[in-house]
Image: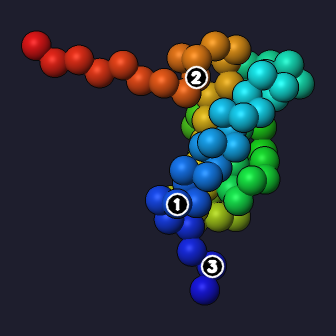
């Protein structure tokens, strides 16, 4: 059975981080769809990335990461009052 769980998502996220600079240089500002250390697609917007990829892969079996040239593409800052 082909599973795609938390371990696979983290491995793909780390793969994205490792190659972030080279992919930004190659693709510019884009949304990358990654599954099992493979880029499934490169898109101009998040909606297209999800809509098109989900036609071939079930939701939850890939990650979509924004590649925008700085760390805001892969970090979130959350604060509470």
The image quadrant of residue 73 is top right
Label 1 belongs to which residue? 7
Q: CA distance from mark 2 to mark 1?
A: 21 Å
Is residue 6 at least partly visible in the picture?
Answer: yes
Q: Is residue 16 above or below residue 37?
A: above
Q: Residue at x 55, y 54 (%)?
A: 9
- Between 55 and 31, the residue placed more toward the observer is 31
Label 2 belongs to which residue? 73
Label 3 belongs to which residue? 2
Q: Is residue 6 above or below residue 3?
A: above
The image quadrant of residue 61 is bottom right
Residue 37 coordinates in the image, percent (x, y): 74, 53
Mark with earlier residue (2, 1):
1
- Judged from the image, the secondary structure of the residue bearing numbered disc 1 is helix
- Judged from the image, the secondary structure of the residue bearing numbered disc 2 is helix
Q: CA distance from mark 3 to mark 1?
A: 13 Å
Q: Residues within 10 Å of mark 2 (few under 14, many from 20)?
A: some
Q: CA distance from mark 2 to mark 3?
A: 28 Å
Name the outermost residue toward the left.
81
Total number of numbered discs in the rendering? 3
Q: Residue at x 48, y 24 (%)?
A: 75
Q: Nearer the viewer, mark 2 or mark 1?
A: 1
Is residue 31 at least partly visible in the picture?
Answer: no
Q: Is residue 63 above or below residue 66?
A: below
- Judged from the image, the secondary structure of the residue bearing numbered disc 3 is loop
């Amino acid at each position: 059975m082909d599973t795609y769980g938390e371990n696979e998502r983290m491995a793909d996220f780390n793969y994205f981080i490792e190659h972030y600079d080279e992919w930004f240089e190659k693709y510019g500002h884009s949304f990358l769809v990654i599954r099992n250390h493979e880029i499934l697609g490169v898109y101009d917007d998040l909606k297209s990335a999800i809509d098109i990829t989900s036609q071939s892969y079930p939701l939850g079996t890939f990650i979509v990461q924004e590649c925008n040239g700085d760390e805001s593409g892969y970090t979130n800052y959350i604060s509470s009052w």
